[in-house]
Amino acid sequence: MLRFTGKLRLRLSSCTLLGLALVGCGPLPVPSGLVYCSEGNPESFNPQTVTSGTTIDATSHQIYNRLIDDNPYTGEFIPALATSWHVSKDGLNYDFELRHGVNFQDRPYFHPTRQFNADDVVFSFERIIDKNNPFHFVSRTGYPFFESIGFEKLIKRVVKLDSDKVRFELNYPDASFMANMATDFAVILSKEYADQLQASGHMSDIDSKAVGTGPFMLVDYVKNEYIRFRRHPGYWGTIPSADQLVFDITPRSTIRLSKLIVGDCSISALPKAGELPVVAAHENLTLESQPGMNVAYWAFNTRKPPLDNIKVRQALAYAIDKQNLLRAVYQDTAVEASGILPPSSWAYTGTALDYQYNPQKARDLLKQAGIRNLSIDIWAMPVARIYNPNSQKTAELIQADLAAVGVRANIVSYDWSVFTRKLSSSNYDSVLIGWSADNSDPDNFYTPLLSCGSVASKSNRSNWCNAQYDKLINRAKVITDKGERTELYRQAEEVIDAEVPLVPLAYAKRMLLKHTDAPPILLMPFGGIGFNDMGNKGQQ
Amino acid sequence: MANYLIRRLNLFIATSLLLIGILFYATHLFPVDLGYALSGIQYPTDAQEAQIIEDYRLDKGSVRQFLAYTGERLSGNLGVSVTSKRPISEELLLALPASFELAFVAGLIALVFGVPLGVIAALTHHSALKKFIMAGTLTGYSIPVFWLGLTLALWFGVKLGWLPISGQINLLYEIRPVTGFMLLDTLLSDSPYRIAAFRDALLHIILPAVTLAVLPFTVVVRITRAAMVNVMGQTYIRAAEARGLPYSKIVLRHALPNALIPLLKHIGLMLGPFASYAIVVEVIFSWPGIGSWLVSGIYQRDYTVIQSGILAVALLIVFSSILIEVLYTLANPLSRKEFYGSN
């Protein structure tokens, strides 16, 4: 049997099919650029206003910059828009020296007349913390990440010391402040653009017609189709080699794979584990993977009976077979979760007790709780996420496990944007969801996922509020000694273990598929994808 | 003649009004605030709120509301999309041409291959060939389109890697929409890559167009065959044969034009199934037409998209059916009696 390589096949086929109609065969010349098959529509073009990874991927490292970046391997901070920083002895004042010669993107709707300075930094953060800022209420979704970490309470004020110097005054010391400044959410907007929008009355454009200082500028967005970026010629860092960057919005993962095979995109997001054998069979495709800073979990709405009963939650935790889940859903691309903090974090101890699969114990606990004929809803995400490539399948497996202990489960799902909106109204029994870290600080798992403050900001999907737990994580936040913090987080895991507001399922690897001839991509354990700064970040 | 056209126009207007009425009623059944369902603005400012009430007469009775709704929709105010916040009419103008392009290419394939094959099936004395064609078309007619689409995509796209199976074009080609037809726009663009872009667009349309063409193709073959068999038995054909006209001339000049008239009528009847097939094909191949736009609108609970998608598709089908009926009447001398009919 004859075997052709992919390219030769393509050439042969286009020749045979179109040979009559068109003169000339061979691979088609394509403009310089990179097509990334992404998994969904962004909700906004400003990462301040969202938590969804899809939006972060499309905006944070493309359009914008942050004051500082975060080296995931060493936990050190790297200068970005700030060239140096200084922390006062009491840990209450953070001074940032700003970079000179940073240009904002010149767009048809905004022509910058000045370069980046302290006003932009003050504006970007005042918008979040100051209710009197005219742009504060322009965001209909609020500032979920900043609300979940209590940023408003933490920051007393942001002061411009000089045109290239900014001071953040804190109300109390916070060990995770720098890490939070390095997250994908803490982007810098243009004050001049905001003023222009305010004058023309189109204030909501600030989050859709984006202007930033990043390596790519937004050209065009067609819902369900694509986002087109062009390189920013005045970028302060290394100017991207690709002339354009296109996000090809392709929600179905099989279609992403086939687009990759026929060459319509050169990098593709979030493959399903079942597709990996197909990738292995194609010589020109490679899989990039990296242990991720994420956790997939099954959260119980602890405010809704009968899930407010600890015994019921424990029973459900005993009832599910995680090993089976890992085999069927992740197929060697994840490790079983024992707590909410993944092993790649420096504070990981691995001592959290684990609810081993024990259906008999589950039945006993339900009997003790006096619950019969329990029926619950499981909300499953419709899209693949880094932490769970296939929530629907996970839900089905859990459904089968629960049936074995006499609990009826009903799987609920909506399109992603509807799903998150309906989740926020909090009328669910349980939800399969997860968390990808935004920075290397362990607090990024404990505070947004389970603290009392995060109930209001809707990132605490268990609606669980525990005073002892809050005390532990708040203490861990103000000290800088890593050993002490690790110990406090271990105790926090014990509280979670006893109360079971959620069942951690898996720590997934981050995966990307790419063509062998696509430029090298350095996959980070956390945060959004960036198409410019990836190559050089690892070396620093 | 004028009377006939007016009657058809009345039919169109009446059907459209009925359709709008059903949509208007259905809009009230959406599980959200009426103003939101009508305008697509979830969090209106006070000024927008007042504008919505003013536009749709939400403070008045339901008859006034219906009239206002009809007026807004017909004047092109379809609201804004819930998900993208852009005017629906803008999105519709991007999606519609893509659907037309696909339907046009599929229809062309069906006619170019279907008519000759139907004629051959009618005239051949080779019984095995006739049976083969008829069996083939029956199979094609029975295959569910979603299965066919997925199989073709799997085979030509994933297994062989020959043809792209999704989208209209490689997105690195930046093509500005002029006509909305990607094949034309690539040629009209001033990009140095326009020939490559055209060939890329052509490669992209092959699989969806072939999949969509299968149903009309089989129908065209079968109708053409039946009509040709019928026509060839008519006395005027025998008279032409008796006069010694060459066989090819009899077939092409005398028989075929008459055989195509019933085909026209059947095309009109086929529009409904064809449109639903087109929606399925668009979804399978992620073709950015009105079908996939409507389906993703349903998944995203984009109420304005759902209404406008249904309205646009239904109006198009109604309009084209009536248009084809008029053409049929004009082409068919026998039915012209109806011009003078009293009914």
Image (spheres, coloured by chain):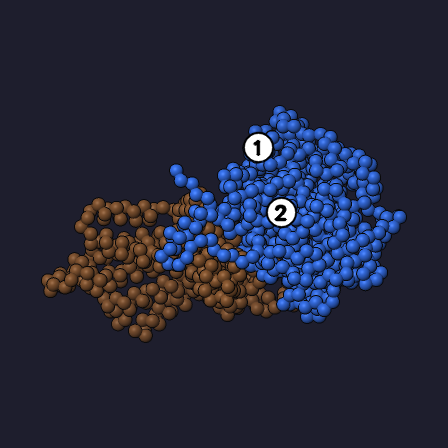
Label 2 is placed on what type of residue? Ile
In percent of width and height, residue A13 lies at: 41, 50
In the orientation shown, which residue stands out farthest toward the right? A89
Q: Position of residue A169 (x, y in %)?
A: 84, 54
Q: Is residue A434 left or right of residue B11?
A: right
- Residue pictured at 35% horizontal, 52% vertical: B215
Chain label for disc 2: A
Q: Residue at x 71, y 63 (%)?
A: A103
In depth, the one of B25 and B239 nearer the eye is B239
State how far apart marks 2 and 1 are (Cα). Answer: 28 Å
Nearest the camera: A506 or A286?
A286
Q: Which mark is drawn over residue A521?
A: 2
Q: Nearer the viewer, residue A467 or A335?
A: A335
Among numbered discs 2 and 1, the one appearing first in the sequence: 1
Question: Is residue B330 shown left or right of residue A88?
Answer: left
Q: Secondary structure at mark 2?
A: loop
Q: Position of residue A401 (x, y in %)?
A: 57, 31
Q: Secondary structure at mark 1?
A: helix
Is label 2 on the same chain as label 1?
Answer: yes
Classify mark 1: residues with Cα within 10 Å, few (<14), some (14-19) or many (20+): some
Q: Nearer the viewer, mark 2 or mark 1?
A: 2
Report x, y in % for residue B23: 48, 60
Image chain in blue: A
Chain coloured brown in the rendered structure: B
